[in-house]
Image (cartoon, coloured by chain):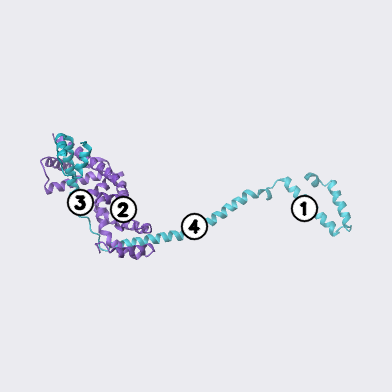
Amino acid sequence: MRCDTVRQMVEEDVEISPSLRVHLDSCSACKEYLRSWQAVRAGLVALGVESPPEPSIGFTKRVMNRIENAREEIQFGEQFIDQIGRRFVYAMLMVALTLLLVLLLPSSGPLRSSGVSQSVLVQTQMATLSNEQVLGVDGSDSGDAADYSNASGANGNPATRGSQ
Amino acid sequence: MANSRPDPSQEAEWIRRCQSGDKEAFAPLVDAYQRRIFAIVFHLVRRRNDVEDIVQEIFMKAFAAIESYNSQSSFGTWLNRIAVNHCYDYLRRQRSSRVTYFAEMSEEGQRQIESQSRGHEEGGLDSEEKLAMGDLVRKLLARAPAEDRVILTLKEIEDRSVEEISEILGLKLSTVKVRLHRARKRMVRDFEKLAGGMVSHAL
């Protein structure tokens, strides 16, 4: 019989059979184990006899109060997230959107490049001139306006040259 | 306060009401199980002053998790499982903040152990010696790993069957048996280490 098997049997309070007795008589280590285990078990049993404390008066009410308080805390947390948290998220979205606009808009803002600004200026001037001709501001007809438009494109308007 | 196990159909009705959000239905369940949970927590933790707070936390946990209770095991077993897991975490926290081993043992404690060791060799323990042995085992348990402490308490102090322990801890029967044997061996080894040390010191 193996020592470990003997020790497991000893722990389980198995009735000492003749073969177990033979092993215990011949194996001092297992005999010692049996003695020690019996001492430890006596201690464990003594601990079991000790009576646990009684719940104090109003224990159930205190538990229920704690549950109620915990629930209120959870509800408060949910409300906080619902009200403050949502506003915070909106504010953050606005900040993010503003930042995005600041990063994307410089090309059409006051810092735009000179080349772009000139082409925009020329387009505006051409549109003004063609409008003047269509409306007959200088007294000529629309055919003259087309000629003038061609002439101003070919001649020396520095703004037009610059854009070409 | 009620102590006896409630009528199963009544208990099932309270649980159903709790699960549908009726907080008040939890109060009779606390009434019915508080003593049982006090006992198991006291046996595991062994700190009288902390027991009530711990039991309150266990009931709060149970209420928070009651929707997950599905009647596969009895409500008592389910509650025991929550209690044991809670105590297990508590013990692990306690143990991690403690100086290890026998350094805390007083001279008086050492004399008691020596005396118990000799008394046991001479055969049998009287009631006073049993109490002293209980005190020694309490100290050994306090220094044991939380896993050993839980399984030994359930088996040797709470006197639960291996089947019950397997249900409470959610382990296979064979695993419970192996862990139990390992925990007992460690207790015996620690006891011999201490008692042997005392005897050799006395010689």
Rendered hue of chain A is: cyan
* Residue highlighted by disc 4: A85
- Closer to us: mark 2 or mark 3? 2
- Closer to us: mark 4 or mark 3? 3
The residue lying furthest to the left in this view is B122
Whether residue A85 is situated above or below residue B105 in the rendered picture: below
Visible residue check, residue B77: yes
| Quadrant of residue A17 within the rendered picture | top left
Look at label 4 and name its amino acid: Gly
Q: Chain of mark 4?
A: A
Residue B178, position as x, y percentages in the image: 27, 43
Residue lying at 31% horizontally and 61% vertically, measured from the top left: A63
Rendered hue of chain B is: purple
CB-based contact (under 8 Å), mark 4 and mark 2:
no
Q: Respond whether the residues carrying marks 1 and 2 are from the same subunit.
A: no
* Residue highlighted by disc 3: A48
* Residue highlighted by disc 1: A124
Tell me the CA gap for discs 3 and 1. Answer: 99 Å
Residue B122, position as x, y percentages in the image: 10, 40
Tell me the CA gap for discs 4 and 1. Answer: 48 Å
Look at label 1 and name its amino acid: Thr
Look at label 3 and name its amino acid: Gly
Look at label 2 and name its amino acid: Arg
